[in-house]
């Protein structure tokens, strides 16, 4: 029992007007329950981040804050900076206000919020990062299941270690938040980051619930962007692969050249060669463009990082 644990629950919200009320009421219930059990202090709170919603999310958030001024705090981004930035702002914002630990959870509470108690228990046992791991992917459609699986496989091959079936439902302690403050890269891939920095970590397993209201904000493009960012910010294996590929292509091209000379000299059998050259040109052209594309992704990372622009802009806050 550690009733001086000040817990913050950070929630990214993008166009979630219908969920703000039920979600905050439910999370307050969770907090009160834990306070009653003396597992957390009564100064614990919810920290909402409105990621530039275009519906009435901020209005609903303001109402929630008015109902529970000591328990709910909120900031509003000036535009949509994406879920990773909203999560980051939630964690850093809570650290600024002060907390022993912060749990991040989605506004739709698809991640079983009743497990927050287990997160806190693990924190009390001395764990500094607790990853929420989903038991299965029943609620995902075929596309999400397959793409997630392919993503973990690819990340593994590329040497980026991320916990499997972990979305951004996790607890991190204030010591870890202080470390997070020091990482100022623009495109921080949170799952990679928390897995890489060490600290005493453990897992909590939970079942995913279907989304009750609204629809998922992620689609093929945003999921691909997240995956590419995860790869380019944590692995340079693709760049190394390009080198290896280049060497193979060189050997192949060189052998083809030798073969052509050999055929010409000894058999005087120089074929028309039209089909061969078309095939070879498009094959190597394809590889080349693909490789330039990979290099381009990394260049894009560097480009975004060197400018050191703010990661998000806050338009309004209710703290
Ligand atoms: N979200 C966000 N910014 C975005 C997209 C999503 O803050 O640009 C939030 C969203 O409000 C939710 C969480 O990120 O709290 C996860 O989004 P969603 O439930 O749509 O994703 P899924 O469950 O399909 O992975
Ligand atoms: Mg969801």
Image (cartoon, helix red, strand yellow):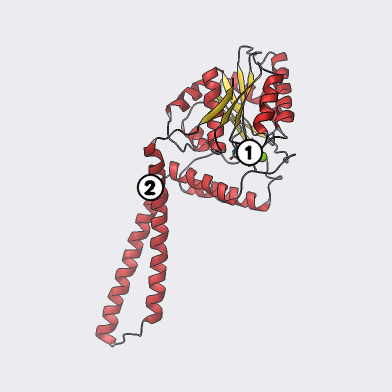
* Label 2, residues with CA under 10 Å away: few <14, some 14-19, many ≥20: few
| Circle nearer the N terminus (1, 2) | 1
Q: Judge left or right: residue 54 versus residue 85.
A: right
| The N terminus lies in quadrant | top right
State the image coordinates of residue 245 (x, y, percent, origin top left): 37, 59
Taking the spot 66% from the left edge, 44% from the top edge, the residue there is 216
* Element marked by disc 1: loop
Residue 24 numbered tag: none
Q: Which residue is mark 1?
A: 54
Taking the spot 39% from the left edge, 35% from the top edge, the residue there is 308
* Label 1, residues with CA under 10 Å away: few <14, some 14-19, many ≥20: some
Residue 155 in view here: yes
Q: Determine which quarter of the picture holds residue 72.
A: top right
The response on whether ligand 1 sits within 8 Å of label 2 is: no
Q: Which residue is mark 2?
A: 299
State the image coordinates of residue 190 (x, y, percent, origin top left): 51, 35
The response on whether ligand 1 sits within 8 Å of label 1 is: no
Q: Do residues under tags 1 and 2 come within 8 Å of each other at their CB atoms?
A: no
| The C terminus lies in quadrant | top right
């Amino acid at each position: 029992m550690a009733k001086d644990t000040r817990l913050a629950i950070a929630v990214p919200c993008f166009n979630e007007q219908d969920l703000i009320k039920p979600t905050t009421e439910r999370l307050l219930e969770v907090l009160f329950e834990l306070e009653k059990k003396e597992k957390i202090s009564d100064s614990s709170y919810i920290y909402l981040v409105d990621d530039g919603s275009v519906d009435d999310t901020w209005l609903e958030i303001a109402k929630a804050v008015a109902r529970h001024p000591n328990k709910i705090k909120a900031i509003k981004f000036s535009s949509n900076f994406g879920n990773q930035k909203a999560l980051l702002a939630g964690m850093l914002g809570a650290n600024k206000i002060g907390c022993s630990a912060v749990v991040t959870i989605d506004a739709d509470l698809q991640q079983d919020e009743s497990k927050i108690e287990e997160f806190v228990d693990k924190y009390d046992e001395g764990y500094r990062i607790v990853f929420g791991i989903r038991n299965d992917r029943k609620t995902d459609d075929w596309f999400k299941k397959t793409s997630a699986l392919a993503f973990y496989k690819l990340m593994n091959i590329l040497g980026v270690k991320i916990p499997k079936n972990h979305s951004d439902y996790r607890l991190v302690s204030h010591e870890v938040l202080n470390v997070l403050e020091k990482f100022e890269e623009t495109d921080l891939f949170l799952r990679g980051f928390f897995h890489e920095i060490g600290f005493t970590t453990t897992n909590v397993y939970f079942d995913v619930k279907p989304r009750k209201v609204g629809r998922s904000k992620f689609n093929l493009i945003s999921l691909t962007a997240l995956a590419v960012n995860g790869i380019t910010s944590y692995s340079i294996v693709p760049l190394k692969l390009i080198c290896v590929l280049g060497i193979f292509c060189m050997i192949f091209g060189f052998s083809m050249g030798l073969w052509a000379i050999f055929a010409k000299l000894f058999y005087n059998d120089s074929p028309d060669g039209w089909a061969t050259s078309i095939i070879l040109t498009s094959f190597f052209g394809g590889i080349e463009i693909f490789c330039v594309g990979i290099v381009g992704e990394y260049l894009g990372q560097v480009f975004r990082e060197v400018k050191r622009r703010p990661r998000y802009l806050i338009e309004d806050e209710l703290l």
